[in-house]
Amino acid sequence: MTQPDRQSGRGRHVTSCAVKAEAQEHGLRILQPDKVRDAAFVNDLKLLNPSIIVVAAYGQILPLDIINLPQYRCVNVHASLLPKYRGAAPINWAIINGESKTGITIMLMDEGMDTGHILLQEEVVIDEGDTAGSLSHRLSGIGADVLMKALKGLEEGSLKPRQQDGIVSYAPLLRKTDGLIEWANSAKKLSNFIRGMNPWPGAYSFLVNERIKILRAEAVEGVGSTGIIKNVTKNKLLVGTGAGLLSILEVQPTGKQVMPVDSFLQGRKIKEGMRFHENTVN
């Protein structure tokens, strides 16, 4: 069971997600309801008579008639140490907020948004070079292993669900416009923001009316004016922020491939004193 096929890319071609492609390879029946609460879909599930339902990044909250359907109920794989970062984008927000660790939570589902009882958790260190993409890849493998332990524990009756305990925080769904860089923030905060937005929705700004996506950058010591290019050489681009300087390492101009900063600087008349803007300017 997965989300319906969606249009994507510049050509707006209809594409299937990776879950569907994998299921097709194995000849599995695939269900793709527009709304998980649809009566016909719920009836399809009842006819399947599942012993358990596993949910991972599905994007819809299941109703009680589905949650209570399986013998072992519905189990969710969530990429945070709940109750921190409930919601759709826990990996992104953990990096954006400069967390040093995150993890995997396997929980029993209820009608709330990631509010169910915890079965198992495993802590994971966030490396300084992690992006949302690299951390997501690492957590997916860890999540699969922890899930298998939880399924075995449920079947054996050795797991005792426990209530979530601690400070609740949220990780709301990101939109494309959320990637706009606010240069008044500190260089360290911007570095984390860029990592958390990579690969999607991508952190971006405007330079001479060109939209530039910044994929990698690091905070360095120094003083500069907000958004103003402090220093530029053939392989270095330093920009002032609210505190410290941001060294831009990897970019993607509109309509171009991802490139290191030295390739970006070739053929462009970028000078010290130019300013990165938060919108296009005339």
Image (spheres, rainbow, N blue to C red):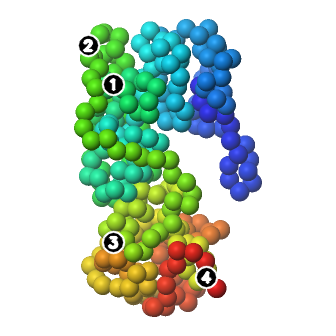
Q: Residue 126 at x, y = what percent?
A: 30, 50
Which circle marks residue 117 in the picture?
A: 1
Q: Using a 10 Å C-alpha cutoff, classify the residue at mark 3 as few (fewer than 14 neighbours), some (14 to 19) or many (20 or more).
A: some
Classify mark 2: helix, strand or loop. loop
Whether pointer 2 and pointer 4 mark residues with C-beta atoms closer than 8 Å, the reply is no
Residue 118 visible at all: yes
Give amino acid for label 4.
Answer: Val
Location of mark 4 (residue): 281
**Residue placed at 49% from the left, 84% from the top?**
275
Q: Secondary structure at mark 3?
A: loop
**Discs 2/1, front:** 1
In this rendering, position of residue 268 left or right of residue 137: right
Front disc: 2 or 4: 4
The residue to which callout 2 is attached is: 158
**Alpha carbons under labels 2 and 1: distance apart:** 15 Å
What is the C-alpha distance between the residues marked 3 and 2?
A: 48 Å
Q: Earlier in the sequence, mark 3 or mark 2?
A: 2
Q: Residue at x 31, y 57 (%)?
A: 98
Q: Look at 68% across and 53% down and name the residue there.
A: 9
Kindly identify which residue carries mark 3.
Answer: 186
Q: Position of residue 97 (x, y in %)?
A: 34, 56
- Work out how far the residue at label 3 is from the one at label 1, CA to CA, in angstroms: 38 Å
Q: Which residue type carries mark 2?
A: Ser
Callout 1, which amino acid? His
Nearer to us in this view, 203 or 65 = 65
- Number of disc labels: 4
Give whichever of 38, 100 is nearer the camera: 38
Residue 130 position in % (x across, y down): 36, 55
> How many residues crowd mark 1 within 10 Å: few (<14), some (14–19), many (20+)?
many
Distance, label 4 to label 3, CA atoms, is: 23 Å
- Give whichever of discs 4 and 3 has the lower sequence position: 3
